[in-house]
Protein backbone atom coordinates (compact mmCIF):
# COMPACT_ATOMS: atom_id res chain seq x y z
CA UNK A 1 0.00 0.00 0.00
CA UNK A 2 2.65 2.55 1.07
CA UNK A 3 5.00 1.30 -1.64
CA UNK A 4 2.26 1.95 -4.19
CA UNK A 5 1.81 5.54 -2.98
CA UNK A 6 5.55 6.18 -3.11
CA UNK A 7 5.88 4.76 -6.60
CA UNK A 8 2.81 6.55 -7.96
CA UNK A 9 3.76 9.96 -6.58
CA UNK A 10 7.42 9.66 -7.56
CA UNK A 11 6.42 8.66 -11.09
CA UNK A 12 4.00 11.61 -11.23
CA UNK A 13 6.95 13.93 -10.47
CA UNK A 14 9.35 12.11 -12.83
CA UNK A 15 11.47 10.99 -9.86
CA UNK A 16 12.32 7.60 -11.30
CA UNK A 17 15.61 6.04 -12.22
CA UNK A 18 19.01 6.08 -10.63
CA UNK A 19 19.53 8.43 -7.69
CA UNK A 20 15.94 8.57 -6.42
CA UNK A 21 14.46 6.99 -3.31
CA UNK A 22 11.94 5.06 -5.40
CA UNK A 23 14.75 2.50 -5.74
CA UNK A 24 15.48 2.20 -2.01
CA UNK A 25 15.10 -1.37 -0.77
CA UNK A 26 13.04 -0.12 2.18
CA UNK A 27 10.17 0.89 -0.11
CA UNK A 28 9.04 -2.74 -0.18
CA UNK A 29 9.52 -3.30 3.56
CA UNK A 30 8.80 -0.04 5.36
CA UNK A 31 7.85 -1.78 8.60
CA UNK A 32 11.29 -3.30 9.04
CA UNK A 33 13.07 -0.13 7.97
CA UNK A 34 11.27 2.08 10.51
CA UNK A 35 11.14 -0.16 13.56
CA UNK A 36 14.81 0.44 14.35
CA UNK A 37 15.74 2.90 17.09
CA UNK A 38 15.51 6.56 16.17
CA UNK A 39 12.99 5.97 13.40
CA UNK A 40 9.25 6.46 12.95
CA UNK A 41 6.90 6.22 10.00
CA UNK A 42 3.30 7.35 9.67
CA UNK A 43 0.45 7.00 7.22
CA UNK A 44 -2.31 9.52 6.54
CA UNK A 45 -5.85 8.32 5.95
CA UNK A 46 -8.79 10.09 4.37
CA UNK A 47 -12.18 8.35 4.33
CA UNK A 48 -10.56 5.11 5.56
CA UNK A 49 -8.05 5.09 2.68
CA UNK A 50 -4.29 5.49 3.12
CA UNK A 51 -3.36 8.39 0.84
CA UNK A 52 -0.12 9.69 2.30
CA UNK A 53 2.94 8.81 4.30
CA UNK A 54 6.18 10.07 5.78
CA UNK A 55 8.62 9.59 8.58
CA UNK A 56 12.13 10.11 9.88
CA UNK A 57 15.20 8.01 10.51
CA UNK A 58 18.88 8.54 11.30
CA UNK A 59 20.68 10.30 8.45
CA UNK A 60 22.89 7.69 6.81
CA UNK A 61 26.48 8.85 7.03
CA UNK A 62 25.47 11.93 9.03
CA UNK A 63 25.97 13.20 12.54
CA UNK A 64 24.19 11.10 15.17
CA UNK A 65 22.09 14.12 16.20
CA UNK A 66 20.70 14.54 12.67
CA UNK A 67 17.69 12.72 11.30
CA UNK A 68 16.38 12.68 7.76
CA UNK A 69 12.76 13.39 6.85
CA UNK A 70 11.96 10.48 4.57
CA UNK A 71 9.36 9.18 2.17
CA UNK A 72 6.87 12.03 2.65
CA UNK A 73 4.43 11.61 -0.23
CA UNK A 74 0.75 12.39 -0.75
CA UNK A 75 -1.70 11.32 -3.39
CA UNK A 76 -3.19 14.25 -5.32
CA UNK A 77 -6.57 14.04 -3.56
CA UNK A 78 -4.88 14.60 -0.18
CA UNK A 79 -2.81 17.62 -1.22
CA UNK A 80 -3.94 21.07 -0.14
CA UNK A 81 -5.95 19.78 2.84
CA UNK A 82 -3.34 20.51 5.52
CA UNK A 83 -2.19 16.91 5.89
CA UNK A 84 1.38 17.82 4.94
CA UNK A 85 1.57 20.43 7.67
CA UNK A 86 0.17 18.05 10.27
CA UNK A 87 2.46 15.19 9.32
CA UNK A 88 5.53 17.42 9.12
CA UNK A 89 4.82 18.85 12.58
CA UNK A 90 4.35 15.35 13.99
CA UNK A 91 7.62 14.15 12.47
CA UNK A 92 9.55 17.16 13.79
CA UNK A 93 8.05 16.87 17.29
CA UNK A 94 8.72 13.14 17.51
CA UNK A 95 12.24 13.50 16.10
CA UNK A 96 13.02 16.09 18.79
CA UNK A 97 11.60 13.79 21.50
CA UNK A 98 13.82 11.02 20.15
CA UNK A 99 16.84 13.24 20.79
CA UNK A 100 17.63 14.62 17.36
CA UNK A 101 18.80 18.23 17.19
CA UNK A 102 18.56 18.70 13.41
CA UNK A 103 16.36 17.44 10.59
CA UNK A 104 17.60 17.14 7.00
CA UNK A 105 15.73 16.46 3.78
CA UNK A 106 16.27 16.11 0.07
CA UNK A 107 13.80 16.89 -2.67
CA UNK A 108 13.64 17.62 -6.36
CA UNK A 109 14.27 21.13 -7.61
CA UNK A 110 10.83 21.29 -9.26
CA UNK A 111 8.84 20.15 -6.21
CA UNK A 112 8.02 23.75 -5.30
CA UNK A 113 4.89 23.03 -3.25
CA UNK A 114 6.88 20.72 -0.98
CA UNK A 115 9.67 23.29 -0.70
CA UNK A 116 7.15 25.95 0.37
CA UNK A 117 5.86 23.60 3.07
CA UNK A 118 9.36 22.93 4.35
CA UNK A 119 10.44 26.59 4.22
CA UNK A 120 7.30 27.58 6.08
CA UNK A 121 8.35 25.28 8.91
CA UNK A 122 11.87 26.60 9.33
CA UNK A 123 13.85 24.55 6.83
CA UNK A 124 16.70 26.45 5.16
CA UNK A 125 18.33 25.67 1.83
CA UNK A 126 21.79 24.12 1.89
CA UNK A 127 24.57 24.44 -0.68
CA UNK A 128 25.40 20.75 -0.59
CA UNK A 129 23.93 17.47 0.64
CA UNK A 130 24.48 16.03 4.09
CA UNK A 131 25.22 12.38 4.79
CA UNK A 132 25.24 9.62 2.19
CA UNK A 133 21.64 8.88 1.21
CA UNK A 134 22.43 7.72 -2.32
CA UNK A 135 19.78 10.09 -3.69
CA UNK A 136 22.14 11.79 -6.10
CA UNK A 137 19.35 12.97 -8.42
CA UNK A 138 17.81 15.20 -5.75
CA UNK A 139 19.23 18.67 -6.23
CA UNK A 140 17.57 20.51 -3.36
CA UNK A 141 18.80 20.01 0.21
CA UNK A 142 17.29 21.59 3.28
CA UNK A 143 17.71 21.38 7.06
CA UNK A 144 16.43 22.92 10.26
CA UNK A 145 17.26 22.81 13.93
CA UNK A 146 14.79 21.04 16.21
Image: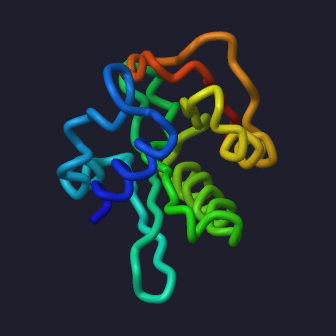
Quadrant occupied by the C terminus: top right
Residue beneath the point at 51% across and 23% down: 138
**Does 41 sit above or below residue 27?**
below
**Is 115 positioned to the left or the right of 25 in the image?**
right
The x, y position of residue 10, in whole percent, is 43, 43
Quadrant occupied by the N terminus: bottom left
In the image, 101 versus 88, the foreground residue is 88
Residue 2 in which image quadrant: bottom left
In the image, 59 versus 72, the foreground residue is 72
Residue farthest toward the bottom in the current orientation of the protein: 47
Residue beneath the point at 18% across and 51% down: 29
The x, y position of residue 48, in whole percent, is 41, 87
Residue 77 in which image quadrant: bottom right
**Does 144 sit above or below residue 137?**
below
Residue beneath the point at 56% across and 32% down: 107
**Is 47 positioned to the left or the right of 35 in the image?**
right
**Does 127 sit above or below residue 114?**
above
**Does 10 sit above or below residue 105?**
below
Residue beneath the point at 30% across and 57% down: 4
The x, y position of residue 55, in whole percent, is 45, 52
Amino acid sequence: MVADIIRLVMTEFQAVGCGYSINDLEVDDMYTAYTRAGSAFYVVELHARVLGCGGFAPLTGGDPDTCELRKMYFMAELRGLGAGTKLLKLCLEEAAKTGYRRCYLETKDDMKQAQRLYSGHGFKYLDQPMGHTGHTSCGTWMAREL
